[in-house]
Structure formats: structure tokens, C-alpha cells
Amino acid sequence: MPEQQSAMTIKLTMLLPELSNTERKVADYILGQPQEVIHLSITGLAANCGVSDATVVRLCKRMGMHGYQELKVNLAQDIVSPLERIHEAISENDTCAQVVEKVFQTTVQALQYTSRIVNPQQLEKAVNALDSARRVIIYGLGNSAAVTKDLQHKLLRLGIDAAAYDDNHLQRIVAAHVETGCVCVCISHSGSSMDVVDAAQMAKDNGALIISLTGVGKSPLSELADIRLDTASRETQYHILALSSRIAQYTLIDALYTCLALKRRGTEHEGAEQCIEKALEKLKY
């Protein structure tokens, strides 16, 4: 019996005669390699097809979708099992012990992958930029929101003026008031969060230096960043929660914090963390 086509595939196939040449390149790529597409950012897909990001967006609109992320979610729902949406490695008959082993192993692999692809020059540039920043603003939405708070907490402990924003309205408001000397750290595993990318572009236009923390590969956010920090995991964008990728982000931030703390030794900033620890002493039994 021939393999049943998904609703997404049927819809895209029916649209083919109406598409422009460039849009058809994208459609053909999606039809030929749907499993690969759910792992790609919009910039990655556009590059593989030899077209612009705008062409991908136009195709999504033709299909009645708001944007590329919606296309990926719908595509994943058609070709990915419900179990895979929870975690790619698990199977229905796994015991709790097996689930624990697989979840931990996936996280360990993400950390190993990330340690191999971290660019030391980019990390050093990020350390220097944060060390000398007049002000640091941190953007992230959804799963990345918790990561922004972690970075804010660590920077404040080092005496660096830092504030994290996980509201898209506040991100734009703050971006409208940044100036030269400010550093904007933007965190998004996909690198395609429209609100974060738009706020980052606004901040950059107003003079801020942009540091991106995204999954490895081309994305709208990493393309506009002045300094790029990457994480790597096999995790894709259709999970209910980004698990291993978020741990990789936390760990890279720990490395960034440690480098900053070492850089500040022997300077007027060295005592900042000790002062903060002393101020917090009375909050503990």
C-alpha cells in the first residue's frame, strides 16, 4: 500500500502551479526533505534553496499561515509522532529508568556538541563587551525567558548593570531608549523569534552592540548579531519544551560568567560579588 500523504503535503502540492519560480524551489525542498526542514531556521532553509527569507515567508502566507514557525509546527504534527514531540529518544514501552537514562544522555550530548563548536574568539569578544558595557539588556521569550533571568542574576553579582525583559512590549520600549555603549544579549534557541529579532534590530539601529545566543546555524537573529554565541543539540523545534538546548544555554552562560569573573580580578570591580554575598547573608538561616 502506498504511503499516505499528509494534509500539509497535499496542500503544498496543489499550490505548486500557482507559485513563482523561487517559491517553487522552497516548496520542492519541503516536499522532498520534510524531516530536514523541521530542523532548519528560516535563514537556513532560504540558504539551502538559494532564495531570500522573504520568499519563504511569502510561501507560508500563500499556505494561509502567519509565518515559517507555524509552517514548521504544522509540518511536524504531520510527520512526527506524539512521543517524539515529548522527546525524540523515548519509546512507548520505556520504563522510568530508561527515560531518565535517555534524557540525561541527550543532555550530555548537547553539552559535548556545544563545547566542540563554541568559538573562543566570539566568547572573548562577548566577555570584553559585557565587561565594558554602560548597560546590559537581555531579551528572551517563552522557554528562553528563564535563561535571561539567569544571565541577569550572574551579571548583577559581578556589579554589571543588567536587566532582563521577557515581555515583547517592554523589549521594544527599552530598545527605543538604548544608546551607544549599551549591549543587548538576545537569547533564542531557534534564532527566529520575531519579537526578539525585531527588538534586537531596533536596539542595534539605536547604537547597541548585539550578542546572540542561538542554536548553531544561520538564523535571522544570528545574522544581525555583532557577536554570536552558539549552542548545539539534536533537539528540534517541535518539542513541548526545549530541554537539552536550554541546559546548553545555561552552561554557556556559566562559562561566560566565569570568564568575566576572572577578567575582573585585580580591578576596581573585584569586590562586587563579595559585597553582594555579604548583603544577602542575613537572608539565610
Image: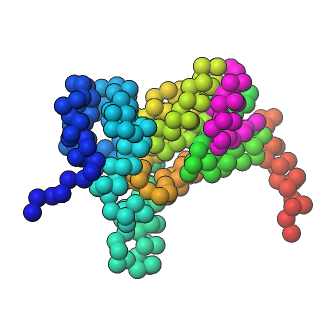
User: Where in the figure is residue 40, as x and y percent of width and height?
Assistant: 35, 42
Left or right of 69, for residue 248: right
User: Quarter of the image holding residue 18?
Assistant: top left
Quadrant location of the C terminus? bottom right
Q: Is residue 262 visible?
A: no
- 53 and 200: which is toward the camera: 53
In the rendered image, residue 194, in percent from the top left (x then y), is placed at: 51, 35
The spot of residue 241 in percent (x, y) is 50, 57
Residue for point 28% across, 47% down? 8
Q: Is residue 141 above or below residue 61?
A: below
Instruction: Name the residue rendered at 85%, 56% in the picture.
Output: 280
**Of the pair 43 and 232, the residue shown nearer to us:** 43
Residue 127 falls in image quadrant? top right
Taking the magenta stretch, the answer to whether it contains residue 175 is yes
Residues 9 and 140: in front is 9
Q: Which residues are magenta?
A: 161-184
